[in-house]
Structure formats: structure tokens, C-alpha cells
Image (tube, rainbow, N blue to C red):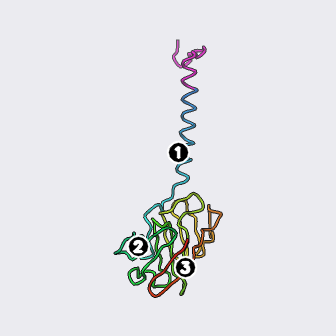
Amino acid sequence: MDPLSTNQSGKLTKSRREFIEKSGLTAALTMFGIGFFTSCSNSDDMEPTGSTGTPMNPGTGSGTGISVSGNKITIDLSIQKDLNADGGWLLITNGKTLVSKVGSEFIALTSVCTHSGCDTNWSFSNATYNCACHGSKFDTQGNVVSGPATQPLKVYDTAVSGNILTITK
């Protein structure tokens, strides 16, 4: 008998059938899982940096000139000199706040992205805040420039007295 022309037929045993069904289901779910988790990935996931490439989260404490207490944040502008220039900005992680200087005005926003709640992966360039978690972009007033976010960032009150910038949430 020629082995190329041999046909065999029969039924799969119950254990073989279950194995094939479960293997197919596992493969399908694996492909879905890979697609699902990589769809939320972005090559820009990184530590926040400014246009100069220097870290913009100075932390808080007496040496940084930043104090977070309840709903108030104070920034000593003689220490945080990045904010003295137009386009200067800071991310204050433990205050969940973004601060920028636009012209002569200081603007403070929540750093909690309205898309999925990311609050530490921000960059700022061309007067636009970029959330690196999923690519949402916001202008300096907190308005959505491009999604996936659909809601604006909350704006906080700011006041300057001498060299002290006070942000009230």
C-alpha cells in the first residue's frame, strides 16, 4: 500500500477533542491579551522631561523651594528658576500638579490625566502638556488638544507675592 494514498478516518476521543478545544481557546485568548495590553503602550513612556531634557520633578523639601500642605502648594521662585522663564514648567508629583509660566502668567493644573488617571509621565513642549501614558495632549489652560482624553485638566488658582508662588487647589 502506498503511504501517500492512505486515508484514515475515525472520531477523536473525548480527551483529544477537549485538548484541541482548550488549546484553540487558549491561543485565541492569548492573542487578544497581547493585542489588548500592547494597544495601551506608547514608546514615549518615560520619566517626565522638559524641552532641555532635564528632569522637571524637583521633589519637595526645604532645599527645593517647594512645599505641599493640604490644598496649598508654595514655590519659591528664587530657587525654582525654571519657572521664571516663559515656557518654564514643573511637575510636582506629591502635589499632583503641573505648573507652567505662559507669558507673565503662572498656570497650575492637576497632573492626573482625565483619560486613565496617570499622574507622573508628563512632558511639556510647544505650550502643550503631553501625557506619555496614552498620548493625550493638553494646552496650558488644561483643554484637550488631542485624545484619547475627552475632559480637560482641572485648573487651580495661583497667586504671586514677592518670590513666592502659591497654588490653591
Image height of 86 relative to 71, above or below: below
Q: Amino acid at mark 1?
A: Ile
Q: Position of residue 79 (x, y in %)?
A: 38, 81
Residues drawn in magenta: 1-20
Pick the front one: 118 or 45 = 118
Depth check, front residue: 78 or 53: 78
Of the image marks 2 and 1, the number of the one nearer the N terminus: 1
Residue under numbered circle 1 = 34
Q: Residue at x 51, y 58 (%)?
A: 42
Cβ–Cβ under 8 Å for marks 2 and 1: no
Residue 116, image x and y in percent?
57, 57
Disc 3, disc 1: CB below 8 Å? no
Q: Residue at x 46, y 74 (%)?
A: 90
Q: Nearer the viewer, mark 2 or mark 3?
A: 3
- Comes first in the chain, label 3 or label 1: 1
Q: How many marks?
A: 3
The secondary element bearing badge 1 is classed as helix
Label 1 Cα neighbours within 10 Å, binned few <14 / some 14-19 / many ≥20: few
Which quadrant holds residue 67? bottom left
In what quadrant of the picture does the C terminus appear? bottom right
Whether residue 40 is in magenta: the answer is no
Query: Quarter of the image holding residue 155?
Result: bottom right
Judging by the rendered image, the residue that carries numbered circle 3 is 158
